[in-house]
Amino acid sequence: MIRDEAYEGPDPAATERQHAKGKLTARERIALLLDEDSFTEVETLRRHRASGFGLENKKPYTDGVITGWGTVHGRTVFVYAHDFRIFG
């Protein structure tokens, strides 16, 4: 499913490398910050339209930025996080 591909990232090994460095993925960081099951992501399947520097051949979902809203202690907040697994 396309949404699963967006959540996993283009390279499953990138998640392993992130964890090996003692770092969490962007979605893991957001999950720790927000109240459980409160996150609503915006434009999960967004892709850039840039060209040059080889970008026309690399169009991952989310463009490496996870964006949305959720709650912290019941209060609505808007969040974003850079997913370094995508463009590093």
Image (cartoon, rainbow, N blue to C red):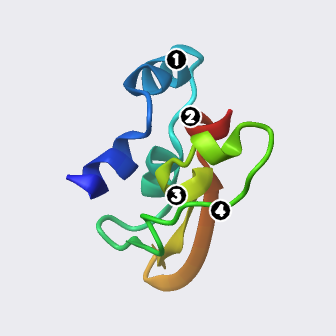
Amino acid, disc 1: Arg
- Can residue 72 be spotted in the picture? no
**Residue 65 in picture, x, y percent from top left:** 61, 57
Going by the numbered disc 4, the residue's amino acid type is Arg
Q: Look at the picture and state if 60 lies above or below 87.
A: below
Query: Pointers 3 and 4 in contact (CB under 8 A)?
Result: no
Per the model, the C-alpha gap separating discs 3 and 1 is 19 Å
Residue 85, numbered label = 2
Who comes first in sequence, dot 2 or dot 1? 1
Among the two numbered marks 3 and 1 on one chain, the one whose residue lies closer to the N terminus: 1
> Marks 4 and 2, how far apart in space?
19 Å
What residue sits right under mark 4 in the picture? 49
Earlier-in-chain disc, 3 versus 4: 4
Image mark count: 4
Identify the residue at the far left of this view. Answer: 1
29 left or right of 74? right
Name the residue that disc number 1 marks. 17
| Proximity of marks 2 and 1: CB atoms separated by less than 8 Å | yes
Q: Residues within 10 Å of mark 3 (few under 14, many from 20)?
A: many
Mark 3 → mark 4, Cα distance in angstroms: 12 Å
Spatial distance from mark 4 to mark 1, Cα to Cα? 28 Å
Which percent across, then down, holds residue 22? 56, 21
For residue 16, say whether it is visible: yes
Three-letter amino acid code of the residue under disc 2: Arg
x, y percent for residue 6: 38, 51
**Which of the pair 41/12 is nearer the observer?**
12
Closest to the camera, between mark 4 and mark 1, is 4
User: 14 above or below 37?
Assistant: above
Mark 3: amino acid: Thr
Q: Closer to the N terminus: mark 4 or mark 2?
A: 4
